[in-house]
Image: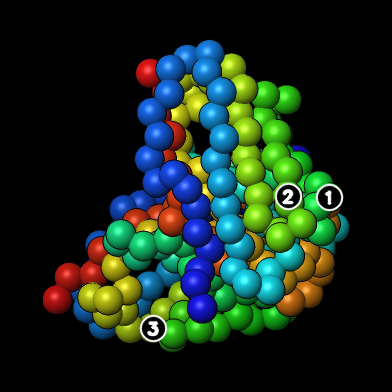
Amino acid sequence: GDSVTQMEGPVTLSEEACLTINCTYTATGYPSLFWYVQYPGEGLQLLLKATKADDKGSNKGFEATYRKETTSFHLEKGSVQVSDSAVYFCALRSTGNQFYFGTGTSLTVIP
Amino acid sequence: DAGVTQSPTHLIKTRGQHVTLRCSPISGHKSVSWYQQVLGQGPQFIFQYYEKEERGRGNFPDRFSARQFPNYSSELNVNALLLGDSALYLCASSLAPGQGIYEQYFGPGTRLTVT
């Protein structure tokens, strides 16, 4: 069945370091892919999305490219800030209209 | 505008009991989805409703059911509660389901504890 595998955490980085959180998926057909973020004490928020192969989603300095050949949707940011500390979830929406989330990666950015 | 609202915030139930969780979507949104998030894991999809009809169902037993009302609010019902049903239950709303542009807005969740 469809699934999402996400890089295990927690991840701790210094401010201005580069971030990559790996996400790979298994799906039939052409799913849509998402990254959600959950800041401390807040609900899940959509960070970025991509709906077809080679699409690049971007928001708040974060980027992820839908790679069908490697079934990946890795989240990247060139320079993280303390305010980026949160839990990040990779997710897919299948062609059968079901949603699958990864287990989440906790990111802590230290000054 | 108000975001997605859920009630109650917290709930404690005993094994074997029944529970009803409620969700009000963002004004203008016609689709509601329900998720179960066990501590330390990602949300697991339970149901999606659109225009009062079920449009998607995850891998959950028949003890879980839901419905959507004419005002697009929704209820999630769980019968014969088990200890393993203890989780944060999230509701998300969107304008409509469908391929292409699709964005869900999540509520704060209802924390259910089964003892």
In three-dimensional space, the C-alpha distance between marks 1 and 3, rounded to whole angstroms, equals: 43 Å
The chain under label 1 reads B
Q: Identify the residue shown where x is 66% and y is 30%.
A: B64
The answer to whether residue A48 of the structure is visible from this angle is: yes
**Horizontal relation, residue A78 to residue A54: left or right:** left
In three-dimensional space, the C-alpha distance between marks 2 and 3, rounded to whole angstroms, equals: 43 Å
The residue carrying mark 1 is B53
Q: Is residue A92 above or below residue B94?
A: above
Front residue (pair A79, B3) = B3
The residue carrying mark 2 is B68
Q: Amino acid at mark 2?
A: Gln
Label 1–label 2 contact, CB within 8 A = yes
Q: Amino acid at mark 1?
A: Glu
Q: Amino acid at mark 3?
A: Gly
In three-dimensional space, the C-alpha distance between marks 1 and 2, rounded to whole angstroms, equals: 7 Å
Q: Is residue A50 above or below residue A29?
A: below
Front residue (pair A48, B70) = B70
The chain under label 2 reads B
